[in-house]
Image (cartoon, rainbow, N blue to C red):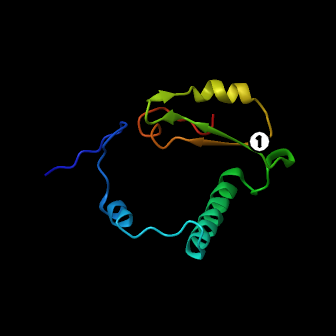
Amino acid sequence: MQKSLLFIPGPVAVSEPVLAAMAKPLINHRGPEYARLLHSIADRMQSIFAGLIGDGQPRSGSDTGILLTHNETSTGVQIDLGAMLRAIGDHPAYIVVDSVSGLGASEFKMDE
């Protein structure tokens, strides 16, 4: 049977590694195992953002951020990223875009 890959809200095909990870027992979100996992993820995210931003230092001495949701999966509502970035202008905050459900189906020009 052929698996379909859907880029829409709702039921989608899920890869075998993801299904296997989801079958594992849950961990206590207040326990030491979760704390180790969270620190591991935070460390990796820091290196990713350092690579994207250059030296890893906050822009203009700011350590604030603006989070934009590119596409709201459950409703299908999508923002105009270009218009949002023009409105933000040269604000010194980091700009982080959540585009999980929008990236595969919409234009996304990270450097513009």
Helix or strand or loop: what does disc 1 sit on?
Answer: loop
Q: Residue 91, percent across and down?
A: 79, 35
- The residue positioned 59% from the left and 64% from the top of the image is 41
Q: Is residue 78 above or below residue 58?
A: above
- The residue positioned 72% from the left and 54% from the top of the image is 54
Task: Identify the image quadrant of residue 106.
Answer: top left
Q: Is residue 3 left or right of residue 28?
A: left
Q: Is residue 76 above or below residue 58?
A: above
The residue type indicated by label 1 comes to: Ala
Q: Is residue 76 above or below residue 94?
A: above
- The residue positioned 44% from the left and 67% from the top of the image is 26
- The residue positioned 61% from the left and 27% from the top of the image is 82
Q: Residue 35, percent across and down?
A: 62, 70
Q: Is residue 8 above or below residue 39?
A: above
Farthest residue to the left: give it.
1
Q: How busy is the neighbourhood of tag 1: few (under 14 within 10 Å), some, or many (20 plus)?
A: some
Look at mark 1 in the image and give the residue it sits on. 93
Task: Identify the image quadrant of residue 25.
Answer: bottom left
Q: Quadrant of the C terminus?
A: top right
